Image (tube, rainbow, N blue to C red):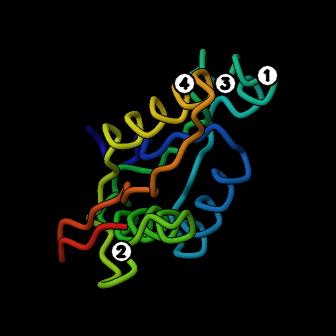
Amino acid sequence: MTNNQFIEVARFFSSSDAHILRALLEAEDIQVEIFDEQFSSLTPVDSVIAGGIKLAILNADIDKAEPIIQAYYNNLKIEAGNVCPECNSLDISRDYVTQFTMFCYATFGAIAGTGFNRTTPQYKKCHSCGYKW
C-alpha cells in the first residue's frame, strides 16, 4: 500500500458527525476525503445500504490521525453517558440480560394488571473499578 492511497478510517450515518471529525483532522493538516455522503443523505435506508458515510485519510497520515480519532470517539462516549461516574473509565458494558428481564416483568405486569413494583436494577458495569449503575 502506497503512502498516497486513501484508506477508510470511520463510517457515519450522520453527515454532521463525519464533518466534525473531518474538521478535527484537517486542523492537524491531515488530508481527508468523505465518500457516499450524497447517497447516504437520501433516506435512512439508503444510508444503511451504502454502508454509511465513509471518511478516509491518506495512508501516510494514519499514525498522526489515530489519537485524534480515538479522542473523538471517547468524547462521544462521555457525552452519551457511557463513562463510569466513579472512576471516569470508558471500559464499561451494559447488562442486556437485566434490561430484558425488567422489560418482561413490566410487560407481564401491564398485561396481568398487577403493575410493576420492582426497583430499577443497575444496567451498566465498569470493568476498571467494578461500580454498577
User: At 40% from the left edge and 34% from the top edge, which residue is drawn?
Assistant: 100
Query: Mark 2 is on which residue type?
Result: Cys
**Mark earlier in primary sequence (4, 1):** 1
Q: Quadrant of residue 79?
A: bottom right
Relative to 80, is 101 on the left or the right? left
User: Which residue is label 2 attached to?
Assistant: 84
The label number, if any, that marks residue 51 in the structure image: 4
Q: Nearer the viewer, residue 109 or 13?
A: 109
Q: Are marks 3 and 1 in contact (CB under 8 Å)?
A: yes
Q: Residues within 10 Å of mark 3 (few under 14, many from 20)?
A: many
**Mark 3 secondary-structure assignment:** helix
Q: Residues within 10 Å of mark 2 (few under 14, many from 20)?
A: many
Query: Mark 1 is on which residue type?
Result: Thr
| Residue 102 x/y as whole percent | 43, 40
Q: Is residue 55 above or below residue 63?
A: above
User: Which residue is label 1 attached to?
Assistant: 43
